Amino acid sequence: MTRRTALAAAAELLAWWAGLVLLWLVFISTVDTLERIVGASAAAVGALLARAGRRSVIWR
């Protein structure tokens, strides 16, 4: 993996993560520390799965 593709992958994961965290914040009313950790972790897992799913349908 070249540096450029690694940066593109990191940017894609960050974009998915940010979108999922924002979606999570829309649905939650009060946010404490534990909920932030759980929400950020769930968004990270979701971002990995979203990237994997997107890459599985692209023919390269």
Image (cartoon, rainbow, N blue to C red):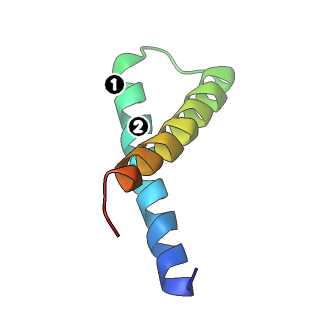
The numbered disc on residue 26 is 1
Per the model, the C-alpha gap separating discs 2 and 1 is: 10 Å
Residue at the spot 61% in from the left edge and 21% down from the top edge:
35
Name the kind of residue labelled 1 in the image: Val
Task: In the displayed orientation, state which residue is furthest to the top.
Answer: 29
Q: Position of residue 13 (x, y in %)?
A: 48, 55
Q: Is residue 13 left or right of residue 56?
A: right
- When asked about the image quadrant of residue 31, the answer is top right
* Front of the two marks 2 and 1: 2
Residue at the spot 63% in from the left edge and 26% down from the top edge:
38
Q: For this rendering, which residue is in front, 39 or 6?
A: 6
Q: For this rendering, which residue is in front, 11 or 35?
A: 11
Q: Are marks 2 and 1 in contact (CB under 8 Å)?
A: no
Name the kind of residue labelled 2 in the image: Leu
Q: For this rendering, which residue is in front, 50 or 24?
A: 50
Q: Position of residue 43 (x, y in %)?
A: 51, 36
The numbered disc on residue 20 is 2
Q: Residues within 10 Å of mark 2 (few under 14, many from 20)?
A: many
Q: Is residue 46 left or right of residue 58?
A: right
Residue at the spot 65% in from the left edge and 31% down from the top edge:
37
Tell me the SS state at disc 1: helix
Tell me the SS state at disc 2: helix
Quadrant placement of the C terminus? bottom left
The numbered disc on residue 47 is none
Quadrant placement of the N terminus? bottom right
Sequence-first tag of 2 and 1:
2
Residue at the spot 45% in from the left edge and 65% down from the top edge:
11
